[in-house]
Amino acid sequence: MNLVLVLGTLFLYIGVRLLAPLPLPAQVAGAAALLACWVVMPKGFGRGSRFGAMLPWVTAGLFSSLLVLTASRDVLLIPVAIWADDYRAWVRMSAVFVLGLAPLVTALSFFLARRTAPVVTVEIPVADLAPGLHGFTIAQISDLHVGPTIRREYVERVVARVNGMGADMVAITGDIVDGSVAELTSHTEPLGDLTSRHGTYVVTGNHEYYSGAHSWIVELRRLGARVLMNEHVVLEHEGAHIAIAGVTDYGAHYFDQSHRSDPRGAVAGAPQGVMKILLAHQPRSGARAAEAGYHLQLSGHTHGGQFWPWNFFVRLQQPFTAGLERIGQMWIYISRGTGYWGPPQRFGAPSEITRIRLVKA
């Protein structure tokens, strides 16, 4: 079915459920507002100026809030219809409540999405960690999604915050962009200013493949990043060695068979007994990574659900939603993401720049 018709049907549902209990002037004003949202929302997705793209996506966020709250209200009205003395009053008050709450949630979510992601520190306890690696820090950026609404100034703020951490290395775990190199090169350029003791290491995410992964790999290398394509590097740090491996996205082979993700191959040839860290965009790589003997996997992809209630649906596709988890003997950390995708909303799943710190268990 046509997307516009589907949206129109859902907007009609919202309008009927929320506006019918209200006085006529409120019904007319509300209907006009919903009609405007229905017209604006499908326009400009992924293209155009920041304002031209931002408005439809903000409208999409408002639509999501209205739809979820309206459906939740309808469920809660079932017991009210059975037990309440004045059902009509409950219907009217709840409609006003939803119409007031949805814009507030959308505004708060917009602020939380557009602010510079805060730094979250996570300590990873590692048994038999070499003394020289105690306190080794990794600044993790994930799911930046530079594109229609995340532009150069946003990237500059993230880079400044990462550089202020003084990390030993920077890891970017995929989904950097939503668009072609030609469209976005001026906006991703600040990533070339990332500084750390051992440099910046990148793996591809699914959105790189939607956006032309081959061109982006070349561009990221031009910016000075080491793009790890099922391979590893061995870093020497304070007299100790650590293997940093990276795999292509879990579904990369659907776009290029030669890019099939291979956690075991990525660490082949690494020195025996060294700490092994895997950068893998999707948490789904974790099972194979654990079998390959990694100590730690850093991932993203999920956004932590990005905003309620979609966080509850992440587990339908991924083994974990966010935070530090364990797979056998391997730790896995899933970032909630440094940017956002689609609606500029963060609610119940705040964005983050992660400071990963290795400590002796």
Image (cartoon, grey):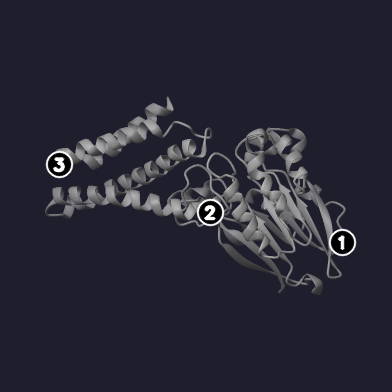
Query: In the rendering, which numbered label is found on residue 33?
Result: none
Classify 26 as above or below 161.
above
- Mark 2 or 3: in front is 3
Query: In the rendering, which numbered label is found on residue 272?
Result: 1
Question: Dot 2 surroundings within 10 Å: few (below 14), some, or many (20 or more)?
Answer: many
- Mark 1 or 2: in front is 2
Question: Dot 3 surroundings within 10 Å: few (below 14), some, or many (20 or more)?
Answer: few
Residue at the (66%, 33%) spot, across then down: 182
For the C terminus, give its image quadrant.
bottom right
Q: In front: 355, or 185?
A: 185
Classify 65 as above or below 35.
below
Please state which amino acid type lies under the numbered disc 1.
Answer: Gln
Q: On the picture, is 230 further left or further right than 337?
A: right
Question: Dot 1 surroundings within 10 Å: few (below 14), some, or many (20 or more)?
Answer: few
Badge 1 or badge 2: first in the primary sequence: 1
Please state which amino acid type lies under the numbered disc 2.
Answer: Gly
Badge 2 or badge 3: first in the primary sequence: 3
Please state which amino acid type lies under the numbered disc 3.
Answer: Pro
Figure quadrant of residue 8: top left
Give the residue number, with chain letter if any, for mark 2.
304
**Local secondary structure at mark 3:** loop
Give the residue number, with chain letter if any, for mark 3.
23
Residue at the (66%, 57%) spot, across then down: 140
Q: At which x and y percent is residue 306?
A: 50, 51
Q: At which x and y percent is residue 302?
A: 56, 50
Classify 198 as above or below 1.
below
